[in-house]
Image (cartoon, rainbow, N blue to C red):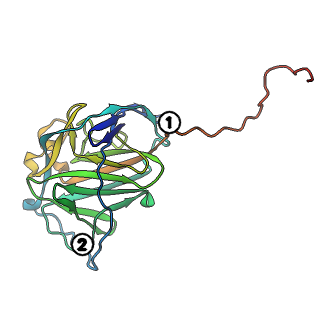
Amino acid sequence: MALHKKQSVAAVMLVALLTGCSSGSNMQEQSVPSIQNESAQTVSVEDTAESERLGTKWGDDVNSEVTTVDLRRTNPEPIEQMQVRYADKAYTGRAVNSMSLLAGKVDFSMATDTGQLSLYRDSGNYYVQGQAGQAYRLVYRNNSANTYEIVASVDGINVLNGSAASRYDSGYVLHPHDDLVIEGFRKSQSSVASFIFSKPESAYAANTSSGSINNTGVIGTAVYGLYDPTKPKPAQPQAYPADNGYAKPPQ
């Protein structure tokens, strides 16, 4: 699991899937508003034309320090999952600045150097319009006092280790009342290759043995709850609190 702040990140790699232990995550701090704006129309969701398809290519080097931490998941299964499809397509209708996860405890949005990208919603599905050559980043805002792990994928690739994505992979740590900004595919402990919209044939997924051009155009998120080691564990009731083998003499 990884923890990422503007230039300092903590990473957590999955240690034991069955017990929910992980270590290797990245969190980054950036303030992105999550006010929702919606129009009265519905989204147009026709099949995306071949000329409108996009992928995400391996972009410029971005400084991003990562630190490995060892935290335990509260549950071996994700407590929330979602995906966003993207294309160079003029979606119309209900537009929101962010997607609400875990009943509002976490907000997801997408940003560029010039501002946020609108997310278009239709029947529980989300879409975003991108443009080839445009850099973007994934933004997660924690509105709660809980600690979460974010396992993110772009075009079917795990953004933390470049492998074919699994929802059970390690991810980034999202601290209470903090932001996590994922700017690219992690290439080392100190940098990532920025996310840049591109034609599918130029996408990273289409040019690595871990990926497939067939998976371009989709962003995935799986969220896990994490035990926070800084919080004291509540005392557990003891059936035999004085079980020392023998009776003590009277005082």
Of residues 101 and 162, the one drawn nearer to the viewer in this rendering: 101
**Residue farthest bottom in this picture:** 40
Mark 2 / mark 1, whichever is N-terminal: 2
- What is the three-letter code of the residue carrying label 1? Pro
Q: Which mark is residue 43?
A: 2
* Place of residue 34 in the rendered image (x, y in percent of width and height, measured from the top left): 32, 62
The residue labelled by disc 1 is: 229
Of residues 127 and 135, the one drawn nearer to the viewer in this rendering: 135
Res. 170 visible in picture: no
In this picture, residue 239 sits left or right of residue 201: right
Q: Which quarter of the picture shows residue 54?
A: bottom left
Res. 237 visible in picture: yes
- What is the three-letter code of the residue carrying label 2? Val
Q: In 3D space, how far apart are the residues under numbered discs 2 and 1 (Cα atoms)? A: 43 Å
Q: Is residue 233 above or below residue 103?
A: above
- Give the label, 2 or 1, closer to the camera: 1
